[in-house]
Image (cartoon, rainbow, N blue to C red):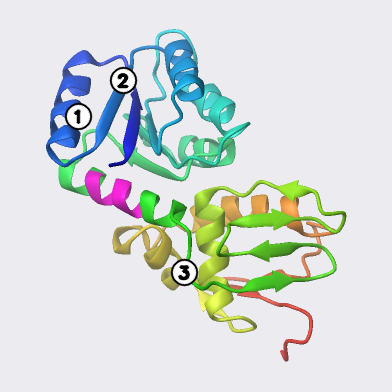
Amino acid sequence: MSAVLIIDDDEPLLRALRLNFAARGYRVHTAGTGAAGLAAAADHPPDLVIVDLGLPDLDGLDVVAGIRGYSDVPIIVLSARHTGPTKVAALDAGADDYVTKPFGMDELLARMRAALRRAAPAAAAPVLRTPAFRLDLSAKQATGPDGGVIRLTPTEWHLVEVLARHEGKLVEHKRLLREVWGPRYETETNYLRVHFANLRRKLEPDPSRPRYFVTEPGIGYRLQLPGDVT
């Protein structure tokens, strides 16, 4: 039974979400302010967090960044703000997905299931080794050349897993978006730009000149490991 923390100050919405989630077997905790949400996430770590951006005390982006600073838990932003820059800012802050209000309950539940699947351990996944990093996909553990742990988000891991299945080969934008976020997000290439920028910042020796997470402009991405034939 997965535990979900909802941080939102809309009490009728909280009641509706609590009832719908509980009916589907989720354990639900709620918080009406950003501060209360941060405390709840620290005191009782959830399996998934849903955050509104328009909180009464803190900007929801700060709440996302605060949780992401110490946890890899999947985070879904649920907000009435629907502009592209706001979505990019939420992803940059560490959110894994973004759902705009008003929303369909079935879609939100599907996005929750997808986020939880991305966070689940992969079975019999490979270990990827380069001079710059080591990625154990089964354990979801990334380390640098000195053995230090590098924290990747569940969405970043899912992107790596998709590319690893096609190592050295081009994976088109639509395929990545469909596999990681679902078919309705096949045009949201800004999601890819944000998450691959973060992956390169964490893993590439020189993020401005990527050696491993390579872009084919306007087409897609490939994972290029030592020994791959281009």
Of the two numbered discs 1 and 2 on the same chain, state the one appearing first in sequence.
1
Residue 91 is situated, as x and y percent measured from the top left of the image, at 52, 42
Q: Nearer the viewer, residue 225 or 77?
A: 225
Residue 215 visible from this viewpoint: no
User: At numbered mark 2, what does the secondary structure look like: helix, strand or loop?
Assistant: strand
| 174 shown above or below 143 | below
Which residues are the magenta region?
109-114
Label of residue 123 in the image: 3
Label of residue 17 in the image: 1
**Amino acid under disc 3:** Ala
Q: Residue at x 16, y 21 (%)?
A: 15
Q: Residue at x 38, y 57 (%)?
A: 181
Contact flag, marks 1 and 2 (Cβ < 8 Å): yes
**Amino acid under disc 1:** Leu
Residue 25 is situated, as x and y percent measured from the top left of the image, at 19, 40
Q: Nearer the viewer, residue 91 or 44?
A: 44
| 99 shown above or below 32 | below
User: At numbered mark 3, what does the secondary structure look like: helix, strand or loop?
Assistant: loop
